[in-house]
């Protein structure tokens, strides 16, 4: 997803310190991607944790809460989404700390977000997984850490407050608001003796429909309570200790209101600890979460526990750097880190239905995450991926459809196909099976393929009648079954086609032979929008390539969309998800014409054979048309494999990394979308980018001397080793390979390598070789060119691994 394209220029995040002894944990820089449209959440969180604490800024680009620019800090809030392209997300109930109110007058303190806005002090930001630290111009230092559902803040106040006539008597406020200002029906209660503050309210999701409720329970430690009260707009009182039903309608959603507690001078180190328990169920549950997870207000212990949990996550990967640069190592570990902050585990917090199944949220969005985030989680943390798949199926069971996007218990917007199908089938192919009801899973994906929902902007697919009868999504479609944004006919067609392809492979594995044939046939619908004589010119000059996807009306006649339209070369912003969008989504026809991941062999043949295909792919990357900051571009780096040119995929990997993925605060080229950019760089640097939905990893040389991954299901370790590794990246060409000592000529791997363990040894050289170039070396495809007729197609995919339901 890309909704905002950054305008910031390069700005280094501090020179990397060279040290041979740095741990993976120490390599992580959470601040990467906090300017330039990355929208990364850089604050404190546990893996897939609900609590995500960070300072919130008043920058335009504060989707993830914080931004590494000169913007001011308006508060500290406890839940966020990372890397979103849409609106700001969550950020409910921000707290703010002031050292005292001038002249002891509570009305001289600041309450509204614009009054609170305080610049940061340069150089005071320190972030590491599970911890964030900043000092603002008032001299107040704010440190934060988290358990799964509780944020813990440690505020350190200046001995002498900087405001005139102020003695140290800290005031900590909480506003009944979220980052996008959507609050309604909020309430707050403050206990004047204990200081305990509980609050709740109703809010809007940031890229979806509906409302959700959120609750907090706040306790303090470190100072005697002086008084407490509430505020409305910029006026405060200590006479009232609760507010009810603040702004019943959204019309007044932005009106400031909240409560505060004021303290005597803190008892030690001028510090006050603030514990914020979180819940989506109730204030009581928020207090319970806080008491259970953070009984002792143990700040340093919590930071240490977070380090331990993150270190365990990173421990499944072992890198022998072999001289790989600090930039590469920092980008790599930070990418791995960002791939594991979402989706969030909200199990036990679901107000919508009762279930014993896990509940994960912030699949934000699956259009972005199916390509590399979920495959990476599958590889590094199969247990979590299993829980996520079960959670998706439980959502299907209770909502009637799988989500394509979901956040804050609300249905999010669908960008293209029903891509949860791909997440599910990818998991099936990779032995993510424990506790998964595959009959339910099959029912869920078939529902996507067969049943059009009344509103297909938020689930399922639109135009299914045309899909089944005409075999494509027409422009200006007559759709009597449901409503949705009638754009993206081309990109929806190619995505639906691939969704049907993966459904076919699951049908085959589960023994539904008739369905297998049906969905395989429908996966060929790609070609119903392929106009074989379509050319593409740039400013009047023919690019020399013929044959592109084009819009098509119900009567079969062709429309026209310039194949470069919606690329950086022509009207880059013309294809967003709105009614004025066009027939492709966030990218040009050029890009979508490459999207036939289940049958690249047919596509290559259609586009004129391997040599022409390689030239076309080169042109796409070199002409300025490719934008690697949006997820649909990722696979295009590796499609050379299908044309028997794995060396060119390796070249492209280095073409984009580190020039577009690096260790600076602006070090990713687009919205991270819950870790999509991070997972792309991590998988690419490990040399095993996946073709999501299939049991296929493209082999390219890792960016390190060797990479080992220990599988969480079998405990086996798989190692990919570069012989003649050269950190200056001249030897990026595989000359020969061995798998467990035997010659290996295929240019792709299957997941069984990671399940069974072993060693893939790649011998590198400075020039492209014959390795992996023969037709029998390339990844599997449907073989015959057949315009979608089953008879002409022969199934060439390898058998799925023996599924073995073990225990965790
Ligand atoms: C911060 O502000 C300074 C001075 O106004 C300006 O030179 C600098 O470019 C700004 N930095 C960012 C990241 O906006
Ligand atoms: C309140 O905000 C103003 C700026 O808006 C600032 O000058 C003042 O110091 C703040 N007061 C306190 C008590 O922090
Ligand atoms: C912070 O430092 C940056 C450069 O690192 C500078 O551009 C900016 O002006 C500084 N901001 C303040 C508020 O001093
Ligand atoms: C935090 O949540 C994870 C799952 O998301 C779970 O494995 C872990 O045990 C939880 N930690 C604690 C301390 O409850
Ligand atoms: C500080 O306090 C003194 C004495 O109460 C008062 O005269 C003065 O106006 C105050 N100054 C400010 C800036 O509030
Ligand atoms: C707020 O609460 C009132 C009264 O319960 C209800 O009528 C209204 O729909 C609620 N508004 C929202 C936006 O939740
Ligand atoms: C497309 O280009 C080819 C080759 O340059 C040319 O033969 C053909 O006439 C062109 N087609 C159209 C519709 O312009
Ligand atoms: C097909 O439909 C399109 C769009 O309604 C229309 O412009 C075109 O003239 C039609 N072509 C034929 C042959 O009917
Ligand atoms: C096409 O021509 C226009 C006008 O000369 C120019 O601004 C634009 O950059 C050109 N585009 C490309 C892709 O060359
Ligand atoms: C780092 O990546 C960003 C985002 O893609 C890019 O703009 C910048 O030029 C890169 N910086 C370096 C030093 O390569
Ligand atoms: C599949 O995963 C299970 C654990 O869920 C494990 O016991 C089994 O060995 C794995 N199967 C294969 C083929 O590796």
Image: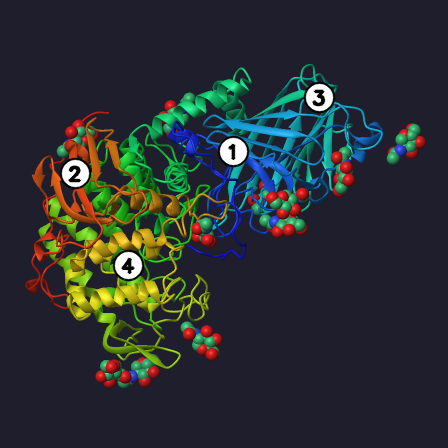
Comparing marks 2 and 4, which lies closer to the viewer? 2
Q: Nearer the viewer, residue 38 or 285?
A: 38
Mark nearest the camera among 3 and 4 is 4
Q: Give the mark toward the camera: 1 or 4.
A: 1
In this view, the residue in front, 483 or 21, is 21
In the displayed structure, 115 sits above or below 587; it is above
Say which element carries label 4. Answer: helix
Residue drawn at x 16%, y 65% is: 610
Q: Secondary structure at mark 3?
A: loop
Which is nearer the N-term, disc 2 or disc 3? 3
Position of 181 relative to 19 (above/below): below
Q: Give the mark nearest the N terminus, 3 or 4.
A: 3
Is 166 placed left or right of 550 in the picture? right
For the residues labelled 2 and 1, the Cα–Cα distance comes to: 36 Å
**Earlier sequence position, callout 2 versus callout 1:** 1
Could you tell me residue 383's position as x and y percent? 28, 31
Report whether the residue tagged 2 is closer than 8 Å to ligand 11: no
Q: Which residue is mark 3?
A: 192
Q: Position of residue 421 (x, y in %)?
A: 26, 49
Q: Badge 4 is on which residue? A: 495
- Judged left or right of residue 681, residue 262 is right
Real-space Cα separation, disc 2 to disc 4, in angstroms: 33 Å
User: What residue did someone put label 2 on?
Assistant: 760
Q: Is residue 248 visible in the rendered structure shown here? A: no
Residue at the disc numbered 1: 127
Mark-to-mark CA distance, 1 and 4:
38 Å
């Amino acid at each position: 997803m890309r909704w905002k394209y950054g305008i910031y220029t390069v700005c280094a995040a501090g020179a990397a310190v060279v040290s041979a002894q740095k741990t993976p944990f120490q390599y992580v820089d959470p601040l990467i991607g906090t300017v330039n449209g990355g929208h990364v959440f850089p604050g404190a969180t546990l893996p897939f944790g609900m609590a995500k604490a960070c300072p919130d800024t008043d920058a335009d680009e504060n989707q993830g809460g914080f931004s590494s620019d000169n913007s001011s800090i308006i508060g500290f809030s406890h839940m966020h989404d990372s890397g979103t392209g849409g609106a700001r997300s969550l950020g409910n109930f921000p707290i703010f700390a002031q050292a005292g109110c001038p002249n002891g007058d509570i009305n001289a303190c600041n309450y509204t977000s614009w009054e609170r806005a305080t610049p940061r002090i340069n150089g005071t930001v320190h972030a590491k997984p599970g911890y964030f630290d900043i000092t603002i111009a008032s001299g107040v230092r704010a440190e934060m850490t988290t358990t799964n559902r509780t944020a813990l803040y440690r505020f350190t106040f200046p001995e002498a407050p900087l405001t005139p006539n102020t003695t140290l008597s800290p005031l900590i406020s909480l506003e009944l608001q979220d980052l996008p200002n959507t609050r309604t029906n909020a309430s707050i209660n403050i206990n004047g003796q204990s200081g305990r503050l509980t609050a709740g309210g109703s809010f809007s999701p940031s890229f979806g429909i509906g409302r959700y409720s959120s609750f907090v329970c706040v306790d303090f430690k470190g100072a005697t309570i002086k008084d407490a009260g509430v505020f409305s707009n910029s006026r405060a009182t200590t006479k009232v200790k609760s507010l009810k039903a603040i702004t019943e309608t959204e019309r007044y959603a932005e009106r400031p209101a909240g409560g505060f507690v004021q303290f005597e001078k803190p008892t030690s180190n001028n510090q006050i600890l603030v514990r914020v328990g979180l819940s989506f169920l109730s204030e009581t549950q928020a207090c319970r979460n806080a008491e259970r997870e953070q009984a002792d207000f143990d700040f340093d212990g919590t930071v240490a526990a977070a380090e331990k949990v993150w270190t365990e996550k990173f421990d499944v990967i072992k890198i022998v750097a072999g001289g790989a640069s600090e930039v590469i190592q920092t980008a790599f570990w930070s990418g791995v880190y960002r791939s594991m902050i979402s989706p969030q585990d909200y199990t036990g917090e679901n107000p919508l239905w009762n279930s014993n199944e896990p509940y994960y949220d912030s699949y934000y969005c699956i259009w972005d995450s199916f390509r590399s985030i979920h495959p990476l989680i599958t590889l590094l943390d199969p247990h979590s991926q299993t829980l996520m798949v079960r959670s998706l199926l439980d959502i299907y069971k209770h909502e009637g459809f799988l989500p394509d996007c979901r956040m804050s218990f609300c249905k999010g917007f669908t960008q293209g196909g029903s891509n949860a199908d791909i997440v599910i089938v990818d998991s099936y192919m990779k032995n993510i099976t424990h506790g998964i009801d595959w009959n339910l899973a099959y029912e869920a994906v078939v529902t996507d393929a067969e049943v059009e929902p009344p509103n297909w902007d938020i689930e399922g697919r639109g135009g299914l009648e045309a899909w089944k009868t005409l075999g494509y999504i027409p422009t200006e479609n007559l759709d009597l079954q449901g409503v949705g944004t009638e754009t993206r006919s081309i990109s929806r067609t190619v995505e639906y086609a691939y969704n049907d392809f993966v459904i076919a492979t699951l049908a085959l594995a589960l023994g539904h032979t008739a369905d297998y044939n049906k969905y395989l046939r429908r996966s060929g619908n790609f070609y119903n929008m392929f106009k074989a004589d379509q050319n593409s010119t740039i400013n009047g000059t023919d690019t020399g390539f013929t044959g592109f996807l084009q819009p098509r009306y119900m009567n079969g006649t062709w429309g026209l969309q310039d194949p470069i339209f919606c690329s950086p070369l022509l009207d880059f912003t013309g294809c967003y998800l709105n009614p004025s969008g066009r027939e492709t989504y966030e990218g040009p026809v050029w890009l979508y014409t490459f999207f036939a991941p289940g049958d690249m062999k047919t596509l290559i043949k259609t586009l004129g054979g391997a040599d022409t295909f390689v030239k076309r792919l080169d042109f796409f990357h070199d002409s300025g048309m490719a934008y690697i900051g949006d997820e649909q571009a990722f696979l295009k780096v590796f499609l050379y494999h299908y044309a028997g040119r794995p060396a060119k995929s390796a070249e492209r990997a280095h073409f984009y990394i580190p020039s577009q993925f690096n260790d600076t605060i602006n070090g990713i080229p687009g919205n991270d979308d819950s870790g999509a950019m991070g997972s792309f760089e991590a998988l690419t640097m490990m040399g095993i980018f996946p073709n999501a939905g299939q049991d296929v990893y493209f082999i390219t040389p890792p960016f390190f001397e060797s990479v080992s991954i220990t599988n969480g299901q079998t405990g086996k370790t798989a190692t990919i080793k570069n012989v003649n590794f050269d950190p200056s990246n001249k030897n990026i060409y595989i000359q020969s390979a061995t798998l467990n000592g035997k010659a290996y000529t295929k240019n792709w791997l299957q997941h069984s390598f990671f399940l069974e363990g072993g060693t893939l040894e790649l011998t590198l050289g400075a020039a492209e070789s014959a390795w992996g170039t023969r037709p029998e070396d390339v990844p599997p495809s449907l073989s015959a060119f057949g315009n979608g007729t089953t008879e002409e197609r022969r199934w060439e995919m390898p058998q799925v691994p023996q599924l073995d339901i073990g225990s965790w």
